[in-house]
Image (cartoon, coloured by chain):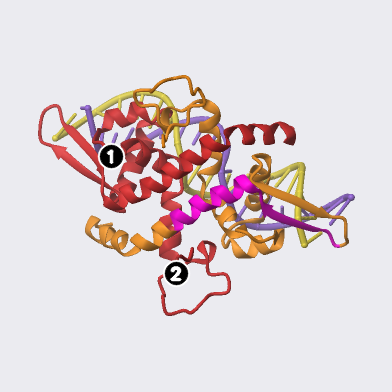
Chain colours: A red, B orange, C yellow, D purple
Amino acid sequence: MSKQLSRDAALPDRKRGDLARADSLAREIFSDIANKWALLIVETIGDSTKRFTELKTEVDGISHKMLTQNLRLLERNGLVHRVVHPTVPPRVDYTLTEPGQALRATVDAMCAWTSRYLDEIEEARRRFGS
Amino acid sequence: MSKQLSRDAALPDRKRGDLARADSLAREIFSDIANKWALLIVETIGDSTKRFTELKTEVDGISHKMLTQNLRLLERNGLVHRVVHPTVPPRVDYTLTEPGQALRATVDAMCAWTSRYLDEIEEARRRFGS
DNA sequence: CGGCATCCGCAAGGATACTG
DNA sequence: CAGTATCCTTGCGGATGCCG
């Protein structure tokens, strides 16, 4: 299982063709995805359906603006599905698409990693000084 | 396998105690880690040993400053091990620690995800318009 | 070579207010 | 309730230069 992101499957084996040197689209996607808020939102939606306000309160510390912005980003990349109910007051539901769910699995792994190494990291910081 | 980041194992089950509401240390770590450059660096070091300059050229687009900065960050959290050789010219080697390797596994998963869904994402973007 | 400090522009992102 | 627009501040992050 290669960690390469290149789409050119014909290339036998780049010298160092991993993520850092991947083609521009992959890099762009990675940059979109690998940010705190996007990952937290994906994680928070999980396998449920969330309204805008729910997300706003559950992803704590996120601003109205950042939430909308990142939701648009995720929607644009096909990670979340956005359903607008023509009611009044309006209601918008967000769910993860299949790609979104797949990404969520990897985010879960990162979360698990964080829990697992919390103490060691704390220790490392202590030793490091600051 | 809980995705909770809370360190208080005594709490039976938070209503929505996932990452978004985790305690401040976990959040801080996640914020440190979940950024483009840190993840790319971890991925690039991989299971090898890299010098500063190698990283500088292989993590393309990264500036001198961002590289040092993120390396310090990773070092501080005990993810990379930094070895300074008292030679002239100086030589500094970076390797991943065990926690670092563990994180790398999850980053690999994210990379795999990106490759896997590249086309679908491209398609989604097309449909989205912009 | 690798690190640190300094300067500085620009864009990220918070606060606020207004629409459907 | 959800989204958009506007303003305004902050600090990210690039460029440069100097040390060990």
Q: Position of residue A10 (x, y in %)?
A: 42, 80
Give the quadrant of residue C13: top left
Q: What stretch is highlighted in magenta?
A: B89-111
Q: Which residue is at 81% across, 53% downward? A: B84
Q: Where A14 sits versus B81, above or below?
A: below
User: Are callouts 2 and 1 both on one chain?
Assistant: yes
Q: Where B123 sits versus B68, above or below?
A: below
Q: Which mark is residue B8?
A: none
Give the quadrant of residue B122: bottom left
Q: Position of residue B85 (x, y in %)?
A: 83, 56
Q: How many marks?
A: 2
Q: Residues at badges 2 and 1 in contact (C-beta under 8 Å)?
A: no
Residue at image mark 2: A6
Q: Which residue is at 41% across, 75% downward? A: A9
Q: In this view, does C9 lie to the left or right of A64?
A: right
Give the quadrant of residue A72: top left
**SS category of the residue bearing label 2:** loop
The subunit carrying tag 1 is A
Q: In this view, does B83 lie to the left or right of B76?
A: right
Dot placed on the residue nearer the N-terminal end, 2 or 1: 2
Residue at image mark 1: A47
Q: Which residue is at 38% across, 46% downward? A: A105
Residue situated in front as seen by the camera: B22 or A21 = B22
**SS category of the residue bearing label 1:** loop
Q: Which residue is at 67% across, 55% downward? A: B64
The amino acid type found where label 2 is placed reads Ser
Q: How crowded is mark 1: few (under 14 residues within 10 Å), some or many (20 or more)?
A: some
Q: Is residue C14 left or right of residue A42?
A: right
Q: Distance between the residues labelled 2 and 1?
A: 30 Å
Residue A69 in magenta?
Answer: no
The subunit carrying tag 2 is A
